[in-house]
Image (spheres, rainbow, N blue to C red):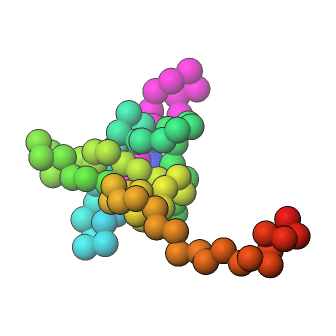
Amino acid sequence: MIGRDSAGGGQLKQASLYQIQLEDGRLLRCDYVEIVSDGFRTLAVGEQVWCSVSPDDPGWATYVVPIRDYSARQLLGLPESSTQNPDPMSELWF
């Protein structure tokens, strides 16, 4: 996410429109309703996100997911792999 637009709503008239720059250089905009999060639907400038481009408006982002909340495997809908090999010695002490 690279910035916020000056238009906004809410009680404090804060900006709720965000600008997202894709890896290919395209700029998209989204509103807070497009942000998928378990907590507050806000983004910080510089925060990495995953999103889809709207089929109705090529300048609008939909399903915007902050990377902070999910692993890459979860974003792709894949199960988490357990690559850890348990250490039998650690089980004795903990």
**Where is the C terminus found, in terms of image quarters?**
bottom right
Question: Does residue 47 sit above or below 43 in this rendering?
Answer: below
Question: Does residue 3 sit above or below 12 in this rendering?
Answer: below
For image coordinates 33% across by 55% down, the residue present is 77
Q: Which residue is the extreme one toward the top?
A: 11
Comparing 36 with 10, the one in front is: 36
What percent of the width, then of the height, locates residue 50? 37, 58
Q: Residue 50, can we see it?
A: no
For image coordinates 25% across by 73% down, the residue present is 24
Q: Is residue 31 left or right of residue 46?
A: left
What percent of the width, then of the height, locates residue 66? 47, 53
What percent of the width, then of the height, locates residue 18? 41, 47
For image coordinates 51% across by 49% down, the residue present is 43
Question: Does residue 40 sit above or below 47 in this rendering?
Answer: above
Reply yes or no: does residue 39 show up in magenta. Answer: no
Reply yes or no: does residue 14 show up in magenta. Answer: yes
Q: Which residue is the extreme one toward the left?
A: 56
**Where is the N terminus found, in terms of image quarters?**
bottom left
Residue span colored magenta = 7-19
Comparing 36 with 84, the one in front is: 84
Q: Is residue 49 left or right of residue 89?
A: left
Question: Does residue 83 sit above or below 9 in this rendering?
Answer: below
What percent of the width, then of the height, locates residue 39? 56, 37
Q: For the image shown, how many numbered marks are present on the structure?
A: 0
Q: Which residue is the extreme one toward the right?
A: 93
Comparing 7 with 63, the one in front is: 63
Q: Is residue 69 left or right of residue 1?
A: right
Q: Residue 39, can we see it?
A: yes
For image coordinates 79% across by 69% down, the residue present is 91
